[in-house]
Amino acid sequence: MSRDRESTWPDGGSGAYVTDSSEQTTGGALGRLAGKAKAAAGSVLGNDELAREGRLQEAQSEAELEAEREREQARRAEAEAGAEARRADVEREREQLRNEVTAEEREAAIERDRDRAEAAAERDAAREQAAAEADRRAGEQAAGAEERQAARLDAQARRAEARADAIDPEEGR
C-alpha cells in the first residue's frame, strides 16, 4: 500500500481506497447523502478520516444548497424589481394617454368658451404634471429599494459560497 492511500476496509484488505488528492466530492443533495454515507461508513469501520471527510462533504453540500437557495431568492427579487419598474412605466404611459385625452377635450371646450377653458386647462395641467412627477419618483424609489434588496441577497449568496469554499477548499479546484 502506498503512503498516500488508506484502506477503508477494517482488516486492511484490498478494496476501495480514498485518496486525499484524487477524490472529488459531489455537491447538492446527492453530495449531502454521499457525505452522510461516508460519515456513517467511517464510524462503523472505525476510520476517523473517512468519517471526517463525510462530515465535511455533508457540510459543504448543505452550504452549496443554501447558497443556491439564496441565489434563487436574489434572482426572484431582481425579477420582481424589474416587473415593478415595468408596472411603473405602464402606469406612467397610461397617465400620459389620459393627459392626451384630457388635452383633446380641453381643446373642444376652448373652442366653445375660450376664456373659461384656458384658466381650467392651466390648473389641470399643473396638477397632472405634479401627480405624474410624484408617480415617477415613487416608482423609481420602489425599484431602487428592490434592486438594493437583490444586491444584498447576491452578497449573501457570495458569502455562503465563500463559506462553502472555506469548509472544503479542494472542492473549488
Image (spheres, grey):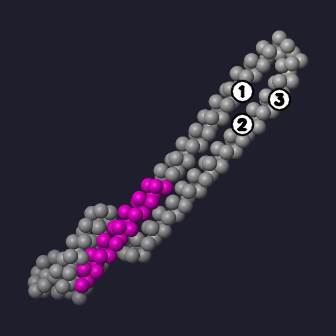
Name the image quarter holding the N terminus. bottom left
Alpha-carbon neighbours of circle 1 within 10 Å: few (<14), some, or many (≥20)?
Answer: some
Q: Secondary structure at mark 2?
A: helix
Question: Residue 45 at x, y = what percent?
Answer: 16, 82
Residue plotted at (83% across, 16% down) = 110
Residue 117 visible, this orientation: yes
**Residue 51 located left or right of residue 92:** left
Q: CA distance from mark 2 to mark 3?
A: 14 Å
Instruction: Label 1, secondary structure: give it.
Output: helix
The nearer-to-camera label among 3 and 1 is 3
Count residues near mark 3 (Cα–Cα under 10 Å), then give few for <14, some for 14-19, many for 20+: few
Q: Earlier in the sequence, mark 2 or mark 3?
A: 3
The answer to which of 5 and 162 lies nearer the viewer is 162
Q: Is residue 65 left or right of residue 76?
A: left
Labelled pair 1, 2 in contact (Cβ < 8 Å): yes
* For residue 163, side relative to residue 15 (left or right): right
Foreground residue, 30 or 87? Answer: 87
Which corner quadrant of the image does residue 69 belong to?
bottom left
- Which numbered disc covers residue 123? 3
Residue 99: mark = 1
Mark 3 / mark 1, whichever is N-terminal = 1
Determine if the magenta segment contains residue 67: yes
Tell which circle, 1 or 2, labels the residue nearer the N-terminal end: 1
